[in-house]
Image (cartoon, rainbow, N blue to C red):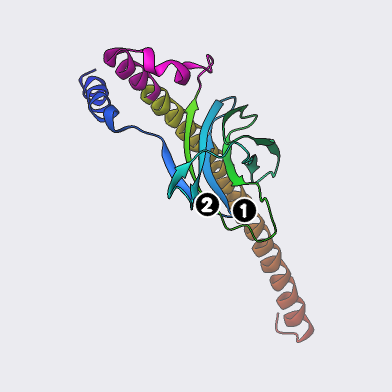
């Protein structure tokens, strides 16, 4: 219990630094993230795309911009999400099977040689059935916001523990299968060795009899 309490305190202290990540795209460049998810985990992704304005020399939201969003199960290749959204939006999906998921975002090209720079602010939330908690963060108090972020961290830890447990079960099954194959291979080797020994003894006996040495 002391260890759990210490862990929760550390998470609470680190929560003010929790923030959405952002990355840059050039033209129709695609950026993908690999996320390992347990089975039946609901994921909500929110994003905001801004483009660099040459005239204003700053990042602005271009409402004409379209963002291509795709989510694919790895290595099965099953497409979970394939849609196009606006410059600001969100998407939600639930993992059908546990494993790696490739989450990709790209700016839809407006011309053949489009090299416009795009900055995307991206955030993901796991197991959030309400789906609209992020829209009302401005109305929460500082304490309520910290509690909300702490709950998200606890859910992340629980999700990682579940994923680790599934990997341990898979590793154990693979080890048992390997051990079983080793045992059967040893038995086959012993049988082959016994057959060879019997054949050699019969062959030598026939040889000695033929040479009248016995």
Badge 1 is on which residue? 28
Magenta: main secondary structure:
helix
Residue projecting furthest to the bottom: 211
Picture coordinates of residue 192 (x, y %)? 68, 62
Alpha carbon distance from label 1 to label 2: 7 Å
Quarter residue 140 falls in? top left
Q: Residue visible at 27% across and 16% down?
A: 142
Residue 194 in the image: above or below residue 9 = below
Give the magenta-colored segment's residue range.
Answer: 127-152
Disc 1 crowd, CA 10 A, few/some/many (<14, 14-19, 20+) = many
Say which of 83 and 108 sits in front.
108
Q: Quadrant of the N terminus?
A: top left
Drawn side of residue 85 relative to residue 211, left or right: left
Say which of 131 and 181 sits in front.
131
Picture coordinates of residue 176 (x, y %)? 55, 41
Disc 2 crowd, CA 10 A, few/some/many (<14, 14-19, 20+) = some
Residue 149 in the image: above or below residue 177 = above
Q: Residue visible at 72% across and 75% down?
A: 205
Contact? badges 1 and 2 (CB < 8 Å): yes
Say which of 120 and 193 sits in front.
120
Drawn side of residue 31 relative to residue 96, left or right: left
Quarter residue 92 falls in? top right
Picture coordinates of residue 154 (x, y %)? 37, 22
Q: Residue visible at 33% across and 21% down?
A: 150
Picture coordinates of residue 94 (x, y %)? 61, 26
Q: Quadrant of the C terminus?
A: bottom right
Badge 2 is on which residue? 25
């Amino acid at each position: 219990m002391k260890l759990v309490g210490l862990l929760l305190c550390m998470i609470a202290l680190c929560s003010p630094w929790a923030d959405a990540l952002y990355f840059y795209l050039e033209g129709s460049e695609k950026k993908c993230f690999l996320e390992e998810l347990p089975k039946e985990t609901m994921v909500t992704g929110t994003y905001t795309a801004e483009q660099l304005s040459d005239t204003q020399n700053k990042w602005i939201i271009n409402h004409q911009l379209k963002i291509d969003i795709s989510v694919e199960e790895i290595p099965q290749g099953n497409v979970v999400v394939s849609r196009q959204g606006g410059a600001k939006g969100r998407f939600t999906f639930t993992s059908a099977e546990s494993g790696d998921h490739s989450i990709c975002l790209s700016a839809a090209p407006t011309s053949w040689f489009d090299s416009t720079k795009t900055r995307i602010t991206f955030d993901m939330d796991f197991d959030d059935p309400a789906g609209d908690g992020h829209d009302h963060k401005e109305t929460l108090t500082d304490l309520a916001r910290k509690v909300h972020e702490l709950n998200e961290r606890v859910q992340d830890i629980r999700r990682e523990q579940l994923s680790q447990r599934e990997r341990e079960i898979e590793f154990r099954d693979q080890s048992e299968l390997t051990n079983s194959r080793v045992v059967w291979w040893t038995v086959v080797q012993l049988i082959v060795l016994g057959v060879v020994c019997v054949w050699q003894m019969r062959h030598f006996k026939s040889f000695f009899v033929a040479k009248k040495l016995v």
